[in-house]
Image (tube, rainbow, N blue to C red):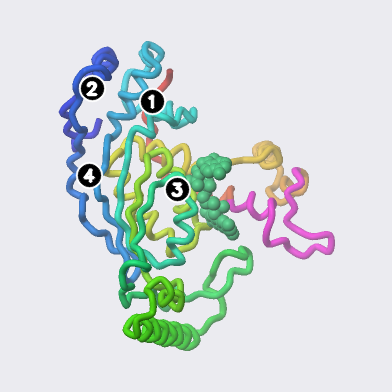
Amino acid sequence: MSNSETYRNKPSSEDKAENKAESKMERVEVARANDMIGKQIPVLDHGFLALVDYMGSDSSIVQAARVSYGSGTKSVHDDAGLIRYLLRHDHTTPFEMVELKFIARMPIFVARQWVRHRTASINEYSARYSIVKDDYYLPSIEMMQGQSTSNKQGREEGNLSKGMREDFIGKIKEKSDDAYKLYMEMINAGVARELARMVLPVNFYTEWYWKSNLHNTFHFLALRLDPHAQWETRQYAVAMANIVKSVAPIAYSAFDDFMLSSVKLSKKEQHAIDLIINGVEITEACKMAKLPLRRDDNKPIKTGEGPEFLAKLERIKSNASGISKADGESI
Ligand SMILES: Cc1cc2nc3c(=O)[nH]c(=O)nc-3n(C[C@H](O)[C@H](O)[C@H](O)COP(=O)(O)OP(=O)(O)OC[C@H]3O[C@@H](n4cnc5c(N)ncnc54)[C@H](O)[C@@H]3O)c2cc1C
């Protein structure tokens, strides 16, 4: 266990941990996580993420697993090994024993993506009840990018000149200010807040409490830390990942290893890798494994299984260069 953790119910041995389930227990405290409570991590231009509270840590995962598997866990001698085993084999319920509660402030368009993660509990600021603040998101010049040519949902540097970017950011600002002016005009005239709010664009900020267990938080992070997730939403996932690392560092490291940095390979992709291992050149291997990189007219294919396989190979290369030593484990 990490030295930064102070367990009042130290689960020092397997037998003791099994008995602990029935004995009186006290709150598991993690010094680094305690330090983070209430501290707002700034995200985007007016947003933030903060840890409100947490329940449990790595030790709670271990404790739950040892209760549920009893003597079946005796061959795993250290907690990191057990956590890595559980995560690797999708033994997910012990991870549900850790809960995290956040408060976040984000643009409505980020909230719309975030809210799709149905397994969390949410309480959002009510714009029917309260007056919306004059805070809206404006992308930076660097983030005001062009439409991606390889991903219909993405962006890339593109051909937008600096002048065009500045012009459009200025226009977004103008429209947002106008929308807020109309909103306040209606509020001041006595229009119901639930109606007046409809003129506010989705770059206005909203705020919510978001509570989720560690298993579902990992699922959220796996999807929203991915480069395919929208950049703005990803910034909240990055802030969340830093908090989660503090609450359950061993579980986070296992998540990074087996989920976040893992690469899923289809049957065709495994075929291509087998060919590459046996000396076939990559483009030829893709062709043989029916992972097309070119059309019949020899024009390059930018999307689909072939290019995605090449992207996976690149990912494997970059992951391999930053690989950390895994903790030993077996059960
Ligand atoms: C890069 C990216 C692009 C996306 N693009 C779009 C898009 O264009 N349009 C769009 O509508 N959405 C889009 N989404 C949202 C996406 O389809 C999911 O709704 C979102 O990521 C939440 O994932 P989830 O359902 O796995 O998570 P959660 O809702 O947290 O659910 C977790 C898991 O619980 C199970 N589960 C929960 N509810 C149900 C249920 N009702 N039935 C069966 N199983 C359930 C599933 O196993 C699920 O994986 C996108 C997401 C990402 C990351």
N-terminal label among 4 and 1: 4
Q: Earlier in the sequence, mark 1 or mark 2?
A: 2
Across and down, in percent, residue 129 comes to 33, 67
User: Going from the N terminus, do you reach mark 2 or mark 4 first?
Assistant: 2
Q: From mark 2 to mark 4, how far is it between C-alphas?
A: 19 Å
CA neighbours of label 3 inside 10 A, class few (<14), some (14 to 19), many (20+)? many
- Given the image, on which type of amino acid does mark 2 rest? Pro
Q: Is residue 207 visible?
A: yes
Which residue type does callout 4 highlight? Ala
Q: Which mark is residue 328?
A: 1
User: Dot 3: what SS?
Assistant: helix
Identify the element where label 2 is drawn. Answer: loop
Residue beneath disc 2: 11
Placement of the N terminus among the 4 image quadrants: top left
Q: What stretch is highlighted in magenta?
A: 289-311
Ligand 1 within 8 angstroms of badge 3 C-beta: yes
- Which of pointers 4 and 3 lies earlier in the amino acid sequence? 4
Question: Where is residue 288 shown, x and y percent of the image?
Answer: 77, 44
Q: Quadrant of residue 158?
A: bottom right
Badge nearest the viewer, 3 or 1: 3
| Spatial CA span between label 4 and label 3 | 20 Å
Are the residues tagged 4 and 1 within 8 Å (C-beta)?
A: no
Q: Earlier in the sequence, mark 3 or mark 1?
A: 3
Q: Which mark is residue 220?
A: 3
Asked if residue 320 shows in the view, the reply is: no
C-alpha distance separating marks 3 and 1: 27 Å
Name the magenta segment's main secondary structure.
Answer: loop
Where does the image place residue 94, in percent across and percent down from the top left?
Answer: 38, 29
Callouts 3 and 1 close, C-beta under 8 Å = no
- Answer left or right for 52 relative to 323: left
